[in-house]
């Protein structure tokens, strides 16, 4: 029973490995698949985080919590 389960798990794991052709990559490279969908929004969030925390050099920004970078 264990070996049968192991075989099914291995078959399922190996069945998920697919080679994507170069001309198919554009289909899978949509904006929803990006690590950071909106870079400007991410930069704003990082700036606000550094401002709130009052940390210097947290994300490459300098300055204190006063917002005067």
Image: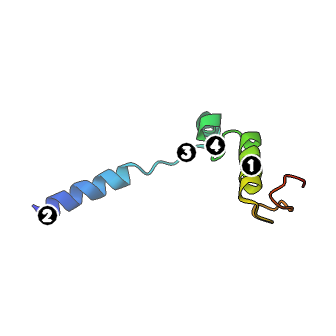
Q: Which mark is residue 40?
A: none
Pick out the residue farthest to the right.
68
Q: Quadrant of the N terminus?
A: bottom left
Q: Which mark is residue 2?
A: 2
> Distance from label 4 to label 3 (Cα)?
17 Å
Tell me the element at label 2. helix
> Distance from label 2 to label 4 (Cα)?
39 Å
Determine which residue is flagged by label 4: 34
Tell me the element at label 4. loop
Q: Position of residue 3 (x, y in %)?
A: 15, 64
Q: Point out the frontmost of discs 4 and 3.
A: 4
Q: Quadrant of residue 36?
A: top right
At horizontal 60% and vertical 33% (from top left) the residue drawn is: 27
Determine which residue is flagged by label 3: 20
* For the residues bearing labels 2 and 4, Cβ distance under 8 angstroms: no
Nearer-N-terminus badge (2/1) = 2
> Distance from label 1 to label 3 (Cα)?
39 Å
């Amino acid at each position: 029973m264990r070996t049968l389960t192991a075989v099914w798990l291995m078959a399922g794991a190996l069945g998920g490995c697919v080679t994507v052709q170069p001309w198919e990559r554009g289909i899978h490279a949509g904006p929803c698949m990006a690590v950071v969908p909106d870079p400007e929004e991410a930069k704003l969030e990082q700036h606000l985080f550094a401002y709130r925390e009052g940390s210097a050099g947290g994300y490459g920004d300098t300055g204190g919590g006063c917002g005067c970078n």
